[in-house]
Image: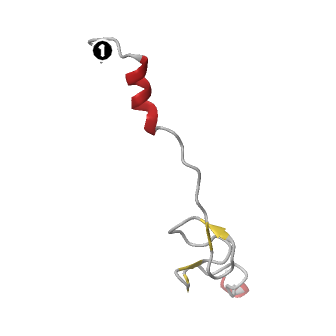
Amino acid sequence: MAVQQNKVSKSRRNNRRAHDALVAANPNECSNCGELRRPHHVCPSCGHYDDKEIVAQADEIDLDEDAA
C-alpha cells in the first residue's frame, strides 16, 4: 500500500490537478451538409468525411425485402 513520506501541501496538490480540467468540445461545420460534427470524425447526419461519402445513410440503402 502506498504511504506518503511527507505531507503534500495544498499548493503542490493543486498544481498537480491543474491539468485535470475538462475541455469543451470544438465542433466543426460539415463541408457537405453544414451540420456541426466532431473534428476528424464522420458527419453523423450525412456520413461524409473529407468530401467523400464514407457511411451510406439508411434511407439511401436499397433494402431487398426478399433477402430477409
Residue at image x 56%, y 72%?
Answer: 42
Q: Residue furthest top?
A: 6
Evaluate whether residue 50 shows in this view: yes
> Would residue 47 be found to the left or right of residue 12 on screen?
right
Tell me if mark 1 has few (under 14), some (14-19) or many (20+) residues whose alpha carbon lies within 10 angstroms of its own.
few
Q: Is residue 22 left or right of residue 16?
A: right
- Number of labels in the image equals 1
Secondary structure under the numbered disc 1 in the rendered image: loop
Q: Is residue 7 above or below residue 53?
A: above
Quadrant (top left, top right, bottom left, bottom right) of the C terminus: bottom right
User: Residue visible at 53% across and 68% down?
Assistant: 41
Taking 55 as reference, is 27 above or below it?
above
Residue ID at (62%, 67%): 37
Where is the N terminus found, in terms of image quarters? top left
Query: What amino acid type should be assigned to the residue bearing mark 1?
Result: Gln
Residue 47, image quadrant: bottom right
Please state if 64 lies on the left or on the right of 15 as rendered: right
Residue linked to disc 1: 4
Between residue 28 and residue 53, name the one nearer to us: 28
Residue 22 higher or lower than 68, as above or below: above
Residue 50 on image: x %, y %:
52, 81
> Where residue 62 sits in the image (x, y, percent)?
69, 88
